[in-house]
Image (cartoon, rainbow, N blue to C red):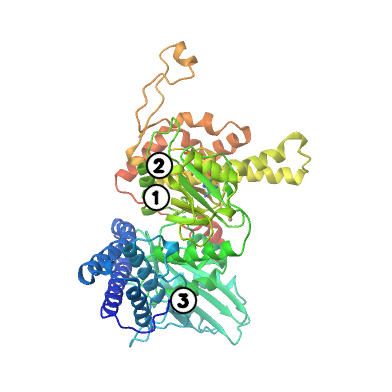
Amino acid sequence: MFPQRLDSSVAYDIAKAMMDGFNRHYRLFRAESARAQHRFETRDWPAQQRAQRERIEFYDLRVRECLQRLVKEFRADAQPMPVWEQVKLHYIGLLVNHHQPELAETFFNSVTTKILKRAYFQNDFIFVRPAVSTEYIENEEPRAAPTYRCYYPTPDSMLADVRHLLEDFDLRVPFEDLAGDAARVLAAMKRHFDHSRLRANCQFQVLSGLFFRNKGAYVVGKIINGFQEVPFALPILHNDRGRLFVDAALFGEDDLLMLFSFARAYFMVDMEVPSAYVQFLRSLMPRKPRAEFYNALGLAKQGKTLFYRDFLFHMRHSTDRFRIAPGIKGMVMLVFDLPSFPFVFKLIKDHFPAPKDTTREQVRAKYQLVKHHDRVGRMADTLEFSEVGFPRARFSDELIAEIQKHAPSQLEISDRDGDGNVEVILRHVYIERRMIPLNLYLQEAFDVLVPDSGADETARERAHAQIRRAVTEYGNAIKDLVAANIFPGDMLWKNFGITRPGKVVFYDYDEIEYITDCHFRRVPPPRDDADELSGEPWYTVGPRDVFPETFGPFLLGNPLVRQAFLEHHADLLDPAFWQAHQARIAAGHMPDVFPYERERRFCAEENKELLN
Ligand SMILES: Nc1ncnc2c1ncn2[C@@H]1O[C@H](COP(=O)(O)OP(=O)(O)OP(=O)(O)O)[C@@H](O)[C@H]1O
């Protein structure tokens, strides 16, 4: 594979044009991310959300542009393989001293696979593994900002250090009470590290780019005191007088995982060396794969590349088999998983039974909508793969039969690359984090509570608490979705899942609608006894009509569920609740979405006491 001579006159030009294409992409991506600060300072929230949505498309646009140039100027599509081998070698040369080499390699893969029109897994000409290291890349331009800033607190300087740490972002809007913010942050910090004994190595390290999303800007860093390291994040918001304030202080891996959750929109951060950001973030949340940090930073294609590499690695180091996912089977999606791998794989079925009235294109459009929308911590992000190959030997026969029955158009079983191994090749698949379906989670608790379960009092108490918590969280999830202008369509328990920290997240998108497109109606009174006794609606139902009063019978059959639901979320059964939100959204109101519990806010009563 390794060319002995670089004798092609066009190979370098192709490599250089490809690199120019990537550099243009990253320049535009970075400029858009950097403009987030101005949008934040001028409180231009609609523009912030629009930019978050539009930036997702940048990558494919640049790949397409680059492709066109290569074909037009260099007839790249007609070049023989030996030329491509040389292109790759020249490209590796161009990566030396590059600040985003891993992203540039992925760009090379995207462009090359399109030109060579081959399936990803068959291709020898792409970067299957990174060729260039991302370790110790530093921005060496004069006056360049380092990836993170360090502050070395002493007992006397600590308050001033926290103040500087906030000031150094140079935001153009003043803080309402910077001294007060610094004092509150420091008081909170002191509860998390041994401030009475400062060790030789005591620092606050803070990433030099702010993390922007929706109406917030987040400072991300860590406290180091000797062997102790405490991750932290500080959300900065605007108050209603147009001044800034620090809303909360988040500490530890779990708080930060909520902030960086796969169920939220991507951040905008001005980064010269993204791999250095990922490395820093990884030191704060070591259990989160690198792929997910790239995703959270808006570098989705890199996230996808790393995910796929992790997946191949996992496949080599595991022996279990894919199986139909636990839970109630979908009518639209065929869902399977590998027990040892924390994701599910979703295929769109070829046919949908009544009452489902949709098409493959419409389902894909709904998933696309979710990808671009603010997911407010309540909708799982999905990765989309085409022509993905799995070893046949790892599929159970039952699963193959299921795919053959429900999604034959998506399935090929063959040895396409001629390596002697039969593969299952799936035409199009969504991949998403595995959660515990809420119906199964509730069932677990119901099973403990049946009279002859043999469970003791503590287990029963725990089961009661599990039901109360899950039902309350379920209602909160729906309310967050409503605030973000999303009507889930199908609100049954099975369409929601529980994440590791116990958050309820929605994952069934085929019936999703914008709240502003729905008609929330009261059930008209029955005209006579016949209407009243009929099991069928006696009124006409339009395609986007929603009757919240009718949710109860589907959702609240179990008395414990019903009790918990009515205690916290009875308003969801009242059309007035939905209509009021619809009116607020239509009037342009953009609600606050906090990636932390409300009681964590400095203005919350319990915190005022703690901090005084
Ligand atoms: N992320 C996930 N984690 C765990 N299980 C999942 C996940 N996504 C789906 N499932 C399982 O697969 C089932 C079907 O998935 P999904 O609800 O997406 O399909 P669907 O065809 O759209 O469903 P419906 O028939 O309700 O429209 C779910 O009920 C659940 O049991």
> Which quadrant holds residue 304?
bottom left
Query: SS of the residue at dot 1?
Result: helix
| Mark 3 or mark 2, earlier in chain | 3
| Mark 1 or mark 3, earlier in chain | 3
Answer left or right for 465 relative to 29. right
| Residue topped by disc 3 | 206
Compare residues 486 and 457 and report the one nearer the observer: 486
| Vertical comparison of 439 with 67: above or below | above
Q: Residue 358, percent across and down?
A: 38, 37
Badge 2 crowding class, 10 Å Cα cut-off, few under 14, some 14 to 19, many 20 or more, is some
> Which quadrant holds residue 168?
bottom left
| Vertical comparison of 4 with 236: above or below | below
Q: Residue 487, percent across and down?
A: 41, 41
Query: SS of the residue at dot 3?
Result: strand
Query: SS of the residue at dot 2?
Result: loop
> Mark 3 is on which residue type?
Val
| Residue topped by disc 1 | 370
- Contact between marks 1 and 3 (CB within 8 A): the answer is no
Compare residues 138 and 418 and report the one nearer the observer: 418
Answer left or right for 406 relative to 227. left
Q: Residue 284, percent across and down?
A: 54, 71
| Residue topped by disc 2 | 512
Indicate which label's residue lies in the foreground, 3 or 2: 2
